[in-house]
Amino acid sequence: MTIFRKIKSINWPGIRENKLYRNLASLKTSCILLCILACFYIIGTIFPQGAQFNDYIKSGGGFITFVIFFDLLNIFNTPAFLIIALVLFINLAICTFERFLTLWSRSKAAAADWQFTPSYTFPLDIKHELKSAEESVKEIFKKELRFKEKACQTYGIYTMEKGWSYRWLTWIYHIAILFCFLGFLMTYLFSFEDEIALYPGEVTVIKPTAASRWNKSWGNKSQPLGFKLELAEFITEYNQLPKLEYPADKLSRLAFAMGWKDPKYTLKEESYFPKDWKSRLKVIKGKRTVLEKTIEVNDPLSYQDITFYQAAYKQNLKIQIDDNPILFETETGKELIIPGVDGMLKFDTMMTGTLFKKEGGIEKIRPFTEVTLVKKEGSGKTEAENIGKLEQDGAIYIDNKRISIKEFKEASILSYRYDPGVPLLWWSGVVVLLAMSLRVFGAWYRITYRIEEKDGASYLLLKVNTKGLIADHERLIKKVKHALISAAEPIDHDTPV
Amino acid sequence: MSNLETILSRDAYILSIEVRLFWLVALLYGICLILYLIHLTTKKTGAGRLATNMLWVAVITHAGLILLRTFEGQRAPFQTLYESLSWFAWSASITYLYVERKWKDIFLPGILVTSLAVGASLYALLTRSPAVEPLSPPLQSYWFEWHVILAFLSYAVFVVSCSIEIVYLAINSSVKKGLRLEYGLNRGNLETFHRTSFRLALFGFPLLTFGIFSGAAWANEAWGRYWGWDPKETWSLITWTVFAIYLHSMSIQKWKELPASLFNILGFICMLMTFIGVNWLARLLGIPSLHLYAM
């Protein structure tokens, strides 16, 4: 309460009369700022964000002068964007503060200065004295229709409300949006992320090579994390994926629609579709395992504010040519030059792990890779020829050379991230959603009424305001009518004024 | 015949039924569109009523189709663009029918809704593969289902909101002069009709917010980044921003009429851009997108 008193004691009228403040407190300013931000967003989807400038030019990107001048490949980190976002934050903060002052004073002053223009007139039982009619109507609204009294005015005008106050709900989710902004700011300043490749059985000290913006700007170097990580096991699982024989051209598809042809599924031996990648991780502190968890995509491991995510995997091969003791090292997906072979060899992903078969069985995969021979022609074009399937304990022959896999190692690649903005963003996001849903989908009713005596009869003059999508004005009027009939036996139906 | 062959031919048989049923649904949507256009040109209420009845038939058949697809894939039916286009056509049509039932003989918004339903269905049928594929690891998340369901519900609501807004802009001056009353709108119901557009956008806005929020939560769980300025993410934010402007402009006296209406239509265009246009844009400009699986 003292904070409110202090806030109230500041010379608000002086500040609030300032033109800049008035502009910043305007809803129109909010809309204009949102429009400007939307333009930034659109630009951000036209130019590839985070792309290297040289790559952009190589891929035929245009508007080079503009791209350089306005830093369009990194538009969401440009001062212009950040300033607009900051002004929007200030605008939102001022609007929310102004709203608070209005709501606070309104809740104290109640609805004393509200204009009363009734929309409905209900005749009441003429046997009632005026005061008792007032009392009984109040009782009906309170007990039967569950309204809460908000104000009793000097001219006998009563205001009652039912449901969550839409004004406060609106205010709450705007405040929560402000906290979301703070969450974004924390992420922007303090988060960092990096990647690590773990081989089964190896214990690795994690030393981030990346630093947060905050640390970078102060020249702080990243420190190793206070724990080690061990990959106990890396698991890969595949589904068998049947291929659908279905035409691409539109006319043939129409033929399918007419029933002239039927779709057909075929299943090739090597048609594997990734089902899951899992890493069984151990967090080691000192010499003790403090945490053990199997992570997969969508199920990360969190320890001491750092979260580890299953990102990818890396496969290393040692290739033997004939019986030569000198081995060639390569990674799957990369090209390898072998002396005496015309072209480069490319080994596809080594299929290992478990296969979930279409007909329901589970089978251990005999590790294999598909080998391709890539030849580069003089014109710069590449030609790829599929050589065949190479099993881990088998061999294939190219240009009379026997090629076999001598060693295979697989690493799990984890990305890890520190982001202190997430909890704040999470909780404020939940508040935004709750308050917004209650405001939009909920029901809020305000009734303002007066009892009037005319020609010896009593009448209830009623005005109804509703907010929220499920608020039903007509249903409320029906309920009021029904409640008045059963309680006071009014002599006639309602008559709209 | 081996067990595997039996399973494959069974799947192919179910798929053939499903694809043909989808063609039938597209045809029904097309007939509805023609009937609504007949209503527009002849001003006959009967054509509008028939179109609405036909649309009910199309929506019920389409609901059956979606159930069949769910049974076929053993998962929620909106993983691929083929599936989400089907879901979009259905959800927009059923939302329209729900809203339309409260009106008396007003059918004009049906033109845009059925046009989109026909367009989405034909786009799916003619250009996308109907193959039922298992979920890839990143899509195996409960956030994914919430994300897609809520986003598409909001899209459906925005489609109907925009249809009403366009009809209102096209007809309101005539109706106020006492003209074109054959379309069911008159001075008495015109503003209520227009208010439905605002109420629908108001309904859709929290859904879109939840859709974006659940998408961010999913991205945070899968990739450790709740926001990556991916083109699809950014366009969803643009849509959200435009609808936020629209809802706020309804509180600004000077912007309440035409500017607000234009923001509503712009929001709808941004929504289409988020759903379909961004895929085209990302391919055209060669921008990598995490949402490429849905293209």
Image: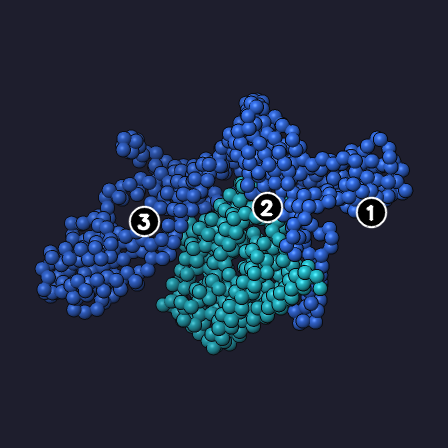
- The residue labelled by disc 1 is A387
Question: Do marks 1 and 3 share a subunit?
Answer: yes
Note whether residue B37 is visible: no
Q: Quadrant of residue A479?
A: bottom left
Q: Position of residue A127 (x, y in %)?
A: 9, 64
Residue in the foreground of this view, choosing between A186 and A101: A186
- Chain A: give its colour: blue
Q: Residue at x 15, y 57 (%)?
A: A136
How is colour applied across the structure in the image? by chain
| Label 1 SS | strand
- The residue labelled by disc 3 is A164
| Label 2 SS | helix
| Label 3 SS | loop
Relative horizontal placement of residue A84, taking residue A130 as reference (left or right): right
Q: Residue at x 14, y 63 (%)?
A: A458
> Which amino acid, mark 1?
Ile
Question: Gap in Å between the C-alphas at discs 2 and 3?
Answer: 39 Å
Q: Chain of mark 3?
A: A
Question: Gap in Å between the C-alphas at discs 1 and 2?
Answer: 32 Å
> Which amino acid, mark 3?
Trp
- Chain B: give its colour: cyan
Relative horizontal placement of residue B109, taking residue A65 as reference (left or right): left
